[in-house]
Image (tube, grey):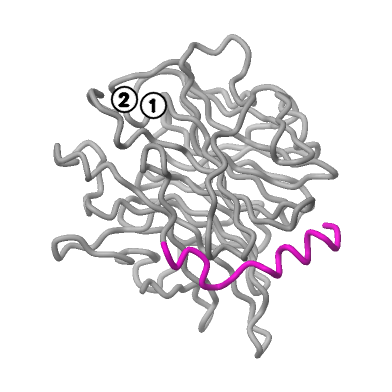
Amino acid sequence: MSQQQINALKLLRPDAFTSPYRDPVWDGPTDPILVPDHLTGEWVLFYTQRRATAPGLTGVEWVHGTAIGVARSSDGGRNWTYQGTADGLVPPETEQPATLWAPDVVRIGDRWIMYLTVLGGVRTDWTGTASIVQFASHDLVTWEYLGAVDLDSPRVIDAAVALCGDGRYRLWYKDEARGSNTYSAVSDTPQDPSSWVLEGLTIPGRPHEGPKVFQLEGTYWMIVDEWRGQAIYRSENAAGGWVRQEHLGGLILTRPEHVDGRPVVGRHADVVPLTAREDGRERALLVYFTHPHWGGEDIDTMAPDPKTRLSHVRAAVLEVRGGNLVCDEH
């Protein structure tokens, strides 16, 4: 990471997203990912631009036909300016209109690599082939298609990529054809989509999505979205051996908001380092989305009231206390 990147990273505020970010087009931003632009010093927010307010849609059409929205902040995340949608993210020969979900953007070498879920067409239900593809960029604006990742499954979504303690990169993702659990693949050259080698099941049990892996206070952590909060796992090196946290049932973001007296859970999150506290303790920003007018677990149980589809992006500070990963949900 260059000195410019480090300087930009230090600008990120612990109180970022004090006013939740709303997408000005469809009012449905989800699956946020936050990266520092090393060329401008700004922070860039990428997200799935769900069509929450689009009229005349049936079933789950509103979560299909989605582009990747982009917003930028020049004040460390307190205020955000919508930039439109990212161009060039539809792979060749994809059925139109394409559905783009849940990007992850990682700095590898001298380029940004985006790992993106792509489906062809718009559907009213949760069917169709979903693949994870890769793009590369030098400026977070112009993207070059690199290819698709072969994960031996017709329905893979929600990519997350990180460098592990064994010196290798891993790709974690939700395999909806295999119990909606987290699986992983490994690579020494993660810029090359053909280099990924399937490892297999990583987090079994209760269905979940949206894995994210990061380091904090010398430990590797993984969070996954269980639709009732974020479940927490830890590992010595992120290469395997994941153990669920016992504190509070292993969950955070179970009630950052409330609607009609019911808790609203935090969903599909990103984690970004912050500067350490004055006492030297490390901390990070947990960036997530909620449905502020709906507190249910299963999207198929949403009330017909259109406002239940609305979402916004919020954040909380993560830290390790007493060996447990915790956050302030207020």
Q: Which residue is mark 2?
A: 61
Q: Position of residue 98 (x, y in %)?
A: 48, 19
Label 1: element kind: loop
Work out whether 101 lies above or below 327.
above
- Residue 36 at x, y percent in the picture: 69, 55
Residue 129 vertical placement versus 162 (above, below): above
**Which class describes the residues within 10 Å of circle 2: few (<14), some (14-19), or many (20+)?**
many
Amino acid type at mark 1 = His
| Numbered disc total | 2
Q: Which mark is residue 55?
A: none
Split into 4 quadrants, where in the image is the N terminus?
A: bottom right
Q: Which residues are magenta?
A: 1-19
The type of residue carrying mark 2 is: Glu
Residue 221 shown left or right of residue 176 in the figure: right
**Residue at 44% in and 68% down:** 18
Quadrant of the rendering where the C terminus is positioned: bottom left
Q: Residue furthest bottom?
A: 279
Find residue 144 and report its horizontal and vertical position in percent: 73, 26
Q: Is residue 302 magenta?
A: no
